Image (cartoon, grey):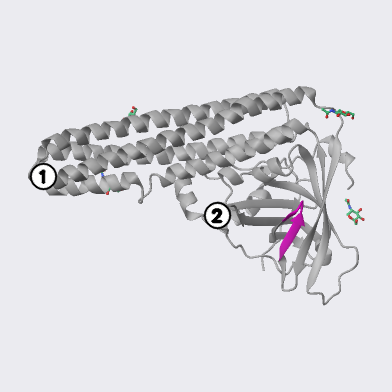
């Protein structure tokens, strides 16, 4: 049982710590499937029922499913009291939010989220292009074989080959570092978009920040592209020099293969760099333009948006629930609880993960609370707990706070 009991006194504004953004490539290799965190199966149904504020969720969920909405609440209720013995219990859930930006923006935010996830996926693909099964690794093996053979016979040729290998190595390190920077860029984009989507101002300032983050990310990728491609091209020249000296046909063949592999890698990098730049420029260009245009059109009227669904709970696995809402069915696992059964639960950490059509995990967390906000240290404790379960919070699963404190939230029922 994981029962997190904490005394909540003051309620400072919610700030989410920047999570570690190094070693993106390592993390992406490690997380290839949905983690299976333990669920809180001792959750008491009657205590659980009631209305909760959403304190935060992933940027993906906020931008795609809650675009333009603030003050999100989830109300869990039952039409008829459950039978004590019932194996399966169906709980009605009603999500309510207040729409504060126009519908053009809502659709732009959703597209931003897809582009951001694509940048993440392409950064991860760039990592994979550098790993031990990559063309560069194969090229290094061939260069290494020839180097070993000629170590004593031709020290003159050994030097350029070692130089080429060293450049390839440092290019790989360069790409790894840039993947970290790119992951951080996507994190910043996601956070800004989540604020814009919730009408957090000043709008112009945030929009400028969005554009400039995108531009600097794009410049960095271009710089990476030209440096790494320039350096790799140079290694091909070094290899070509050595080839002209070698008479051993097997050396010539190995080095020619290495050169071809490097050339293929350069082609892959060029297309990867341009794909990432294209995605970034769609965010900074057309999508940012849409947001800007829509902001000047948007009505001052605020619409209450209600979504209904159901949560299914099964005996023995009360915390391992299933949510059906908007024609989708997804896991809805309670992985942390704060509070006591008799006094009511003050916070719930809910986790949902499914594999997408590429077999990559799509992870969402939802932090629900009986009060509109909870102290940042507690948020961090809960998010760190999620991390220890192997739940990803980076790049495409950035956690963002939900606006719960604007005066307009008073328009919703409590
Ligand atoms: C390149 O990296 C590989 C693997 O990390 C290493 O074995 C090799 O010695 C390095 N070569 C050079 C020239 O730095
Ligand atoms: C790669 O290229 C950049 C810029 O052209 C240069 O500053 C850097 O030293 C190069 N790295 C290697 C290992 O050649
Ligand atoms: C603005 O509000 C009016 C009336 O409430 C509505 O008819 C119109 O469609 C709204 N326009 C936009 C752009 O949402
Ligand atoms: C939650 O749902 C119950 C049952 O429908 C209702 O009585 C209650 O008023 C709702 N609470 C909120 C805050 O909407």
Instruction: Give how far across and how far down residue 264 sits, in percent.
Output: 34, 39
The image quadrant where one finds the N terminus is bottom right
Residue 357 % position (x, y): 58, 52
Q: Which residues are magenta?
A: 320-328
Give the SS element for disc 2. Answer: loop
Q: Residue furthest left?
A: 153
Judged left or right of residue 242, residue 19 is: right
Q: Quadrant of residue 99?
A: top right
Does the magenta-highlighted stretch encompass residue 350? Answer: no
Identify the residue shown where x is 56% and y is 28%: 281
- Label 2 environment density (alpha carbons within 10 Å; few <14, some 14–19, many ≥20): few
Against 240, residue 250 (above or below) is below
Residue at the outermost bottom position: 85
- Looking at this view, is 70 or 313 the one in front? 313
Disc 1 residue crowd, few under 14, some 14–19, many 20+, Cα 10 Å = few
Query: 265 and 179: which one is in front?
Result: 265
Q: Which residue sits at x=68%, y=45%?
A: 61
Taking the spot 48% from the left edge, 45% from the top edge, the residue there is: 24
Secondary structure beneath label 1: loop
Please give the name of the residue rendered at 70% of the width and 56% of the height, measured from the top-left corner.
350
What kind of secondary structure does the magenta stretch mostly adopt? strand
345 to the left or right of 126: right
Which of the numbered marks, if any, corresponds to residue 248? 1
Rendered view: 199 above or below 118: above
Residue to which mark 2 is pinned: 359
Q: From the top left corner, tell me how far across and down residue 187 is, in percent.
A: 58, 39
């Amino acid at each position: 049982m994981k029962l997190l009991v904490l005394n909540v006194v003051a309620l400072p504004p919610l700030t989410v710590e920047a999570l570690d953004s190094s070693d993106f490539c390592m993390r992406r290799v490690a997380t290839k499937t949905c983690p299976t965190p333990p669920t809180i199966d001792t959750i008491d149904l009657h205590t659980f029922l009631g209305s909760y504020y959403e304190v935060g969720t992933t940027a993906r969920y906020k931008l795609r499913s809650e675009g333009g909405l603030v003050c999100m609440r989830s109300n869990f209720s039952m039409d008829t009291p459950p039978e004590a013995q019932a194996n399966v219990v169906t709980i009605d859930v009603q999500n309510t939010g207040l729409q504060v930006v126009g519908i053009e923006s809502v659709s732009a935010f959703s597209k931003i989220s897809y582009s951001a996830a694509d940048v993440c996926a392409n950064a991860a693909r760039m990592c994979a292009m550098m790993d031990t099964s990559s063309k560069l690794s194969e090229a290094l093996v061939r260069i290494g074989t020839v180097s070993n053979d000629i170590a004593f016979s031709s020290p003159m040729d050994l030097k350029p080959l070692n130089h080429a290998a060293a450049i390839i190595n440092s290019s790989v390190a360069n790409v790894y570092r840039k993947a970290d920077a790119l992951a951080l860029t996507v994190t910043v984009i996601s956070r800004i978009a989540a604020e814009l989507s919730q009408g957090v101002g000043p709008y112009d300032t945030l929009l400028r920040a969005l554009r400039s983050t995108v531009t600097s990310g794009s410049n960095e990728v271009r710089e990476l592209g030209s440096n790494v491609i320039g350096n790799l091209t140079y290694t091909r020249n070094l290899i070509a020099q050595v080839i002209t000296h070698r008479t051993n046909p097997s050396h010539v063949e190995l080095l020619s293969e290495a050169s071809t592999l490097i050339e293929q890698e350069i082609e892959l990098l060029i297309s990867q760099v341009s794909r990432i730049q294209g995605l970034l420029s769609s965010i900074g260009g057309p999508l940012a333009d849409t947001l800007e245009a829509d902001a000047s059109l948007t009505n001052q009227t605020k619409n209450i948006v209600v979504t209904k669904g159901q949560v299914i709970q099964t005996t023995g696995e009360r915390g391992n629930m299933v949510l059906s809402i908007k024609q989708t069915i997804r896991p809805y696992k309670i992985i942390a609880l704060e509070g006591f059964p008799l006094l009511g639960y003050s916070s719930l950490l809910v986790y949902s993960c499914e594999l997408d059509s590429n077999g990559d995990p799509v992870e969402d967390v939802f932090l629900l609370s009986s009060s509109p906000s909870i102290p940042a240290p507690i948020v961090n404790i809960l998010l760190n707990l999620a991390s220890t379960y192997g739940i990803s919070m980076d790049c495409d699963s950035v956690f963002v706070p939900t606006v719960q404190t604007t005066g307009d939230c008073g328009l919703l029922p409590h």
